Image: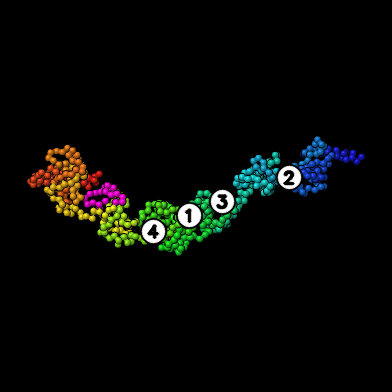
Amino acid sequence: MKNIMEELLAESNIARLTPGQIVKGVVTGIRQNEVLVDIGAKTEGKVRLSEFDDPDEVQLGQEIDVLLEKVEDSSGCPIICYDRACQQKNWENIAATTEEGSIVQGKIKGKTRGGLLVNIGVDAFLPSSQLDMKPVKNIEQFLGRTYDFKVVKINYERKNIVLSRRELLEEDRWKKSRQLFDDLKVGDIVRGFVKNITDYGAFVDLDGVDGLLHVTDMSWGRVTHPNQVLRVGEELSVMVIAIDKEKEHISLGLKQTAPNPWDSIEQRYPVGACVKGKVVNLVPYGAFVELEEGVEGLVHVTEISWTRKVMKPSDVLKIGQEVDAVVIGIQREEQKIALGLKQLEANPWEQISHKYPVGTVIKGPVRSLTNYGAFVELEKGVHGMVHVSDISWTRKMKNLEEMFKIGDEVEAVILSVDGDGHRIALGIKQLIGNPWAHISDYFKIGDTVQGKIVKLTNFGAFVELSHGIDGFIHIGQIRDGRVEKIRDCMKLGEEVQARVIKVDTENERIALSIKALEYNAEDLREEVNAWNNSSSNTANFVTLADIMDSK
C-alpha cells in the first residue's frame, strides 16, 4: 500500500515538473564523479561533481537548485544540471544589477575562439586584445587567475557579456601617470625597469610611466650603443633631468646619479702630469685615450712624434693599446684634455740650431722628392729640404728625379734653422760660388768655346759650357746662308765649337756663333754689332731656364 502511495506522489510531482525550470533538490548520494539529487521524481537525478566550484563542500542532505533539462531519459531518470541553474540565477542577478561600464570580478576559466572565457557568475567573453595593454604571447599564464574586468557590452537577448581588462589597466596607468607627473620634480632619483632599448637610448618604466634615458646620459664615458650599458628588464636608479607635462615626456639620466669626473679634472690631471690610458678611438686628426670612465683625452697627430711626420694615427697606434702620455692642456668647460706622446722624450729640435749652425756642410741620403725640393736626412728623424731654387745657379730644376734618386748621398750646406717650426733649409748651389759673379773671368766676347748640345729649339740650340753655364746659338749663327731646320745640321749630345758674341751679365745670358769661328777681328766686331742691334736676335736670346719655364 505504501509503495503505491509513493508512486502516486512521484507521478503527481512529475506532472508539475517542466523542462527548463529551476527546481530544488536534495543531495542523497556522493560518488567519485557524480552527485545524486532527489528532485521529487521517480528516481534521483545525477549532477557531475566537476560542476561544483569546490566539490569538497558538497554534503549529504544539502539542498541545491538544479536546472531540469529533461523530465525522464530512456531509463526514467531526470536529466538535471547544477551549473546551468547557477548560470541562469546569476544571469538574472547580473541583468538586474550590472550595466555596461561597471566593474566585475571574475576568474579566467579557459580559452575560446578569439579570446577567453571568464566566470563572473556566468560565462563572459574576454577578447584576446583586451587581456593586457600589450600583445600576450603566452595566454596560458592567465588561466585560473582572478582579475577585475570592465563590462563593455551586454546582449540581454543572447545573454552575452563582453569584458575588458585592458581598459581598466589603461585607466589605472593614466591615473598613475597623472599622479606621477604631479609628484615628480627635476632632480628626483627614481627607480624603474628598462622596458625597451633603441639605437638612441632606452625607455624606462617608472611604475606605469615611460621615461627616456638618452644614450648621451647613460655614462660620463664613451657609449656607442645603449646595449653596452643596459639590458631589457634591468632595474636601475635614474635622475629626472627634464619634465614636459604638456607632451607627457620625462627625460632621465643615469650618469647624473654619479659625480661628474670633470668637476675636479685639474686636480687629478694637472698640466705636465704623466698619465696612463687606453686608446679607444682613432680619427684622421688624432687618437682618443681613455684615462678613466668618462674622461678621454686627445692626442693630436702632431703630438705623436717630434721627428716622424705621422700622416695617420693608425700607422702608430691601435685601438685597445695601453699608452703613456703627458697632459699638455685642459679645457674643463668643453670637457677636453690635450695629451702628447712625444713629450715623454727630449725634443731633438731644441739642440738642432747648436748642432747644425748656418754654414755647416752636411752629407746625408735623399729620403723623399717633391715638386718643390728634396728632403735630406741629417740624422734619424731630422730632415732638411733643398729647395729647387737652391740646387743650381744656372739651371732651374723641373724634374728632380732626373738628378736625384732616393737613397743618393748628397752634400749640402745649412742655410737656415727654424727649431720651432721644425724646418731646416739646405742648399747645394751654395757649396760653390755663383759663376755669374765672375763671368768675365770665364767668358769674353771673341773667346772660342766648346760644349755639348743639350737642347734644340726651332730658333736655336743650347750648349752646355764650363762652370755649369749654358750658351745659346741662334739658328742664324750656325752658318752663312739660311738654315731651314736646325735639326738638319745639329744633334743633341753633339760637341760643337763656337765663339762668344754676347755676354749679358744682368740677365745671365751668353750668345754664341759657329759661323764666327772663321771671322777676323773686324768681321767679329761687325757680327757683334749686328747681333746687338737686331731686335729679332734679342727676342730670341733666351736661356735654357727660360725654355724650361715655358714648358
Residue that label 4 marks: 342
Q: Amino acid at mark 1?
A: Arg
State which region is magenta.
Answer: 388-408
Query: Can the viewer see residue 47 in this picture?
Result: yes
Q: Residue at x 83, y 38 (%)?
A: 14
Q: Secondary structure at mark 1?
A: loop
Residue that label 2 marks: 90
Residue 155 spot, x, y in % from top left: 68, 41
State the quadrant of the N terminus: top right
Q: Is residue 394 magenta?
A: yes
Residue 222's tag is: 1
In the shown orientation, is residue 257 left or right of residue 71? Answer: left
Residue 80 spot, x, y in % from top left: 78, 40
First in residue order: circle 1 vs circle 3 = 1
Tell which of 271 and 519 is nearer to you: 519
Residue that label 3 marks: 232
First in residue order: circle 2 vs circle 3 = 2
First in residue order: circle 4 vs circle 2 = 2
Chief SS of the magenta region? loop
Measured along the vertical axis of the image, is residue 292 above or below residue 528?
below
Distance, label 1 to label 4, CA atoms, is 25 Å
Residue 376 spot, x, y in % from top left: 30, 54
Q: Nearer the viewer, mark 4 or mark 2?
A: 4
Q: Nearer the viewer, mark 3 or mark 4?
A: 4
In this figure, what is the number of numbered marks?
A: 4
